[in-house]
């Protein structure tokens, strides 16, 4: 007898031993969105909070690798640029993805550092097809509680990657889109890129 989970309901199914082995092997890496988000956040928190002898650049590189696994940078960058995305060439899009990743990563990690590890609370998840929302709260060191919902979608290998965050009900990608659109409207896309490059240099993302 083997127990399988389908649509939140556990079903008991009689299965030959050989099929049980195949089933367990094929689903061993199938981790739900909440567990994946929790794993990434815990790993990043340990890296940014660990007072080890590891150099700042090594820490930054390690954190970056986790962030690159956690976030769907192309989708987030596309959403943040909005209607201006279609006007960009492939090379401009690639450049913008890297610049956006740097800015977003820096802002996100600044929030991670303001909280205590035990104050990340996971409230549940809602899965609809290939997308899922993971609901969380973060208690900062000053005692304030912030609600953060991670919007994720499943990709190759069953990995859930974040394409937006709702903080206190506000889409962070949407917030960036408003800012970026304002800069382009007042000045130009080239000016936006210039500002993002300056922010990237101050962060030191390679």
Image (cartoon, rainbow, N blue to C red):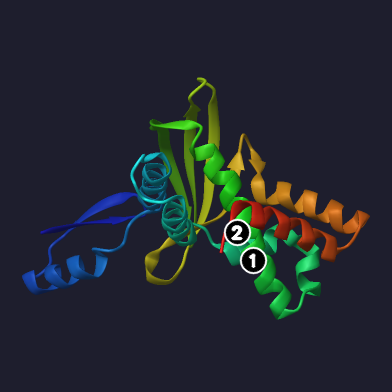
Which residue is drawn at the image coordinates 83% and 55% (left, top)?
A: 181
Q: Residue furthest bottom?
A: 90
Task: Give me the disc on residue 89.
Answer: none
Q: Is residue 165 visible?
A: no
Give the camera-side residue of 3 and 29. 29
The residue at the far top in this view is 143
Q: In this picture, is 199 found above or below 24?
A: above
- Residue carrying label 2: 101
Q: Residue at x 48, y 56 (%)?
A: 67
- Circle 2: is it few (<14), some (14-19), or many (20+) Cα within 10 Å? many
Q: Is residue 89 visible?
A: yes
Q: Position of residue 59 (x, y in %)?
A: 42, 52
Residue 35, compared with residue 148, is above or below; it is below
Estimate the x, y position of residue 52 in percent, counting from the top left.
33, 43
Q: Are marks 2 and 1 in contact (CB under 8 Å)?
A: yes
Q: CA distance from mark 2 to mark 1?
A: 6 Å
Q: How many marks?
A: 2
Of residues 125 and 205, the one nearer the viewer is 205
Residue indicated by mark 1: 97
> Residue at 47% across / 31% down in the picture?
115
């Amino acid at each position: 007898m083997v127990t399988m989970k389908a649509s939140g309901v556990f079903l008991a199914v009689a299965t030959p031993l050989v099929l049980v082995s195949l089933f367990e092997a094929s689903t061993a890496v199938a981790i739900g969105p909440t567990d994946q988000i929790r794993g990434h956040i815990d790993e990043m928190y340990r890296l940014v909070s660990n007072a080890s002898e590891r150099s700042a650049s090594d820490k930054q590189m390690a954190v970056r690798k986790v962030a690159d696994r956690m976030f769907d940078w192309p989708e987030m960058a596309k959403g943040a640029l909005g209607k201006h995305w279609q006007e960009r060439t492939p090379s401009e899009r690639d450049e913008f993805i890297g610049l956006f990743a740097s800015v977003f990563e820096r802002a996100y990690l600044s929030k991670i550092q303001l909280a205590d590890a035990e104050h990340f609370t996971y409230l549940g998840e809602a899965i609809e097809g290939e997308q899922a929302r993971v609901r969380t709260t973060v208690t900062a060191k000053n005692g304030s509680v912030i609600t953060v919902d991670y919007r994720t979608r499943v990709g190759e290998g069953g990995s859930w990657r974040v394409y937006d965050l709702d903080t206190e009900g506000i889409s962070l990608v949407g917030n960036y889109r408003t800012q970026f659109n304002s800069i382009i409207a007042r000045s130009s896309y080239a000016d936006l890129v210039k500002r993002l490059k300056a922010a990237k240099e101050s962060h030191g993302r390679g």
